Image: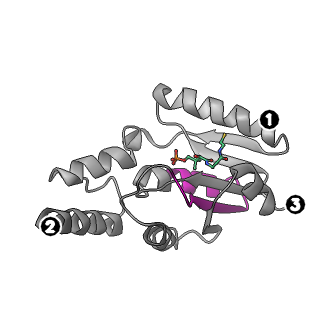
Amino acid sequence: MKVTAVYPGTFDPITNGHLDIIGRGVGLFDEIIVALLKNADKEPLFSLDERLEIVASVVKRFQKVRVESFDGLLIDYARSRGARAIVRGLRALSDFEYEFQMALMNRRLGPDLETVFMMPSETYSYVSSRLVKEVVGLGGDVTGLVPQEVLDRLKARYASARKR
Ligand code: PNS
């Protein structure tokens, strides 16, 4: 039986930590759907269309991975795709409480779906989309922590913001 996993998130922007998790998931699941939340409360730096385009481009090398957006409950979306698992990355203890609550709420809403936590390589254990944006916004270098395409787009976005 084909096992599909959904890897949900905001991905604003996708980092090498996220890609590390996707790479690990590819070894476990028959298909991974990277699912971008449509109406995140957070004001994203990149629009949904931009994030979809970026993610699609950087996961091209993985045959079993595709990208979609969703709104509403993650559980409903995952079910609509016939998924059996929800993948989330865990970097540090500080991630745990939020992830634990979400996983248990999702289990209550959809006992048929299992949340699978994966740890990225320690190389990326401190990398977050938020920090990456902050560092580039202040003129710092995040080479190696995000795909080159993301790096280029981040630099361009903040350069145009500075001109304004
Ligand atoms: O990358 P993020 O911002 O940590 O991802 C959070 C996300 C998208 C996984 C979470 O906000 C989510 O699943 N939202 C969909 C709405 C939902 O199902 N909420 C109940 C979760 S218990």
Q: Give the residue pinned by disc 3.
A: 1
Figure label count: 3
Q: CA distance from mark 1 to mark 2?
A: 47 Å
Mark 2 or mark 3, which has the lower sequence index?
Answer: 3
- Residue type (three-letter) at the residue carrying disc 1: Arg
Residue 122, picture quadrant: top left
Q: Which stretch did the figure color magenta?
A: 20-40
Q: Quarter of the image for the C terminus: give it.
A: bottom left
Mark 1 or mark 2, which has the lower sequence index?
Answer: 1
Q: Is residue 27 above or below residue 88?
A: below
- Residue type (three-letter) at the residue carrying disc 3: Met
- At numbered mark 1, what does the secondary structure look like: helix, strand or loop? helix
Q: Is residue 86 left or right of residue 128?
A: right
Q: CA distance from mark 2 to mark 3?
A: 54 Å
Q: Give the residue pinned by disc 1.
A: 108
Q: Residue at x 79, y 40 (%)?
A: 109
- At numbered mark 3, what does the secondary structure look like: helix, strand or loop? loop
Q: Residue at x 48, y 66 (%)?
A: 48
Q: Position of residue 58 (x, y in %)?
A: 46, 69
Sort mark 1 into few (<14), some (14-19) or many (20+) by Cα contacts within 10 Å: few
Q: Is residue 83 above or below residue 52?
A: above
* Disc 3 versus disc 1: nearer the observer: 1
Q: Give the residue pinned by disc 2.
A: 164
- Report if the beta carbon of the residue with label 1 is closer than 8 angstroms to ligand 1: no
- Residue type (three-letter) at the residue carrying disc 2: Arg
Q: Position of residue 74 (x, y in %)?
A: 69, 51
* Disc 1 versus disc 2: nearer the observer: 2
Q: Is residue 110 above or below residue 36?
A: above
Which residue is more in the foreground, 46 or 132?
46
Q: Position of residue 136 (x, y in %)?
A: 22, 54
Q: CA distance from mark 3 to mark 1?
A: 24 Å
Q: Is residue 47 left or right of residue 98?
A: left
